[in-house]
Structures are given as C-alpha cells and as structure tokens.
Amino acid sequence: MLSKNQLGFLYMFMSICAFSLMDVIVKWSVDYPIGQVLFFRGFFGIIFYFFVIPRDRLHNFYITKRAGLHFLRCASGLIALVAIFIALRKLPLATVVSLSFAAPIFTTILSIFLLSEKVGVFRWLAVIIGFIGILVITEPGISELNIYYIFPIIFCLGLSYVAIAIRQLSSTEPVWLISFYFSLSITILSLFTIPQGWVMPNFNHLILLSLVGVFGGVANLWLSQSLKYAEVSLVTPLKYLALVFAIIFGYFIWDEIPTIKTLLGALLVIISTLIIFRREIYRDKIITSKTTND
C-alpha cells in the first residue's frame, strides 16, 4: 500500500508524462490549424471529465456561484494555451519547456497586486535570477527578431493568473468543475475558427489529435491529485523532468539539440522557481504555526 507522499509522487510523474506527450502531439500537428487542435484539446477533455464527476452531482454539476471568476480563469487559460501551442510549433521543444518553467516567477509578481501578498528579499532574488535565465534563453531569439520567443512569456503570464484564480476558486469549487469549464471554453472558442479552414484528418491522425484532449485532461487531474496527497516540496522538483523529456523527444523526433545558453538559462529559471517554492512552504508553515498558537 502506497503512502500519501508516494501516491502524490506517482501522480505528479504521470502528470508530467501526459503533459509531455500532449506537447509532442501539438508540435507534430503543424498540418492542422491551431483552432482545430484546440477543439480536440477541449472536446475530449470535456468527455473525460464526465467520468470523474460524482454521481450525485450529474444532474446539477454545472452550478456555480462564482461564474465571474470562472470566466477570468478560462480567459487567461485560453490566452496561455493558444500562446504555448504557437510556441511549440515555432520553437525547439526544450526551449519552450525551459521558458514555461518561469510561470511561478510571474505568479509571485502578480500576487503582489492581486492578492496583496508581501514578497520578501528571497523571493525578489528568485525573481531576478529567473528573469536573468529568461534573458539568457531568449537572447538569440531577440537578436534575430524572432517574435515567437514572446509566446512562452505570454503563456507564463496567462498561467500565472490561472494559478491565482484556481487558488481562489478551489476554496469553494471542486477541481473537476474548474477544469470542466476550462475545457468547455476551449471547445467553444475553437468552433469560431472553423471558417479559417479545418482539415479532415485520416483515422490515425484523428486518434493522435484526440489524445491531445485525453492527455491534457488526465494531466490536469493527476496534477491536482498529486498536490492533494503529497507535500509540495516533494513533488514540485519532479516538474523539471519535463525538460529531460523535451530534450529526448526533440532530439529523436525533430533532430533538435538544445544550446548551452538554453540549458544555462533553464538552470537559472529552475533555481529561481525552487527558491520561490521553498519560501512559499516556509511562509505557509509560519502562518500555520501562528494560527495554531493563537
């Protein structure tokens, strides 16, 4: 029988694998419009969540008293998703994954303005280290005026607000409902892109495109389960396995070899996010200790 931390570790590992496979399929799908790929991500995500909705909520699963916050979460999530889809098609896989690690840096900054959180010296140091890492990774792209390097940054900004919105929503809303509304919003948005010219996939491609939604759906659920069962400090470092997978897939499928600058920048971003996570854990322990003593 696995302990809670072991279960959380396993769920995080499976989540990373699923997200990595989804990224590979999105990068492969260059012959299909992004709107069409978004449809598969949203529609098959919806189907998946119907299997995890509790039976006693099937008749009214959609009811929420926080529609406005759901809308903001979905809007920011859509911006992030479209941005990362574009980036995956236009940039090396390892570069995109490395830049995506910077999301907690932007979350720290946004939390100051949206949650009125106080950020200490260590977290500001982490932010500075992280931005240096971003500059190291993107410098070649900026010097060559490669506009596509901006899309992983847009993804990080969108995901940063998503993290804050989910933190607020999860106090009253179940995880599956938050994810369901996001998948629904993806599907609705994608339908507006039909006039741009969708492509009829063959059977094999249909299966692969459908897996974008399946992998995306289960990855989000497994991520939530991981954070539910295990200590954040235990499972968070596992996220960086995604870079290992990206390097392996990028090399064997697209002959991509990450540059020294990409790896160095990724290391700085990883150090930055680890500092942020450690300070978050320390702060939570202090708050818990004060609450217990009061």
Image: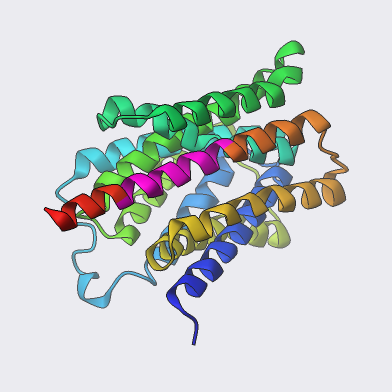
Query: Toward which corner of the image does residue 68 lie, by quadrant?
Result: top left
Left or right: 286 in relation to 66: right
Query: Toward which corner of the image does residue 66 lie, by quadrant?
Result: top left
65 w.r.t. 54: above or below = above
Q: How many marks?
A: 0
Q: Residue 165 placed where, x, y %?
A: 31, 41
Left or right: 96 in relation to 144: left
User: In the rendered image, is residue 194 in sight?
Assistant: no
Q: Residue 98 placed where, x, y %?
A: 66, 38
Residue at 65% x, 41% y: name it.
97
Residue at 49% x, 74% y: name it.
7
Toward the viewer: 207 or 227?
227
Please report the bounds of the magenta region as a residue range.
272-285
Q: Residue 281 placed where, x, y %?
A: 39, 49
Q: Is 75 covered by the magenta stretch?
A: no
User: In the rendered image, is residue 103 in sight?
Assistant: yes
Q: Is 273 covered by the magenta stretch?
A: yes
Q: Residue 242 placed where, x, y %?
A: 66, 51
Does the magenta stretch mainly form a helix, a strand or a loop?
helix
Q: Residue furthest front?
A: 293
Left or right: 288 in relation to 157: left
133 w.r.t. 9: above or below = above
Residue at 72% x, 18% y: name it.
139
220 w.r.t. 113: above or below = below
Residue at 47% x, 51% y: name it.
42
Left or right: 288 in relation to 43: left
Q: Residue furthest bottom?
A: 1
For the rendered model, the colour scheme is rainbow
Toward the viewer: 51 or 204?
51
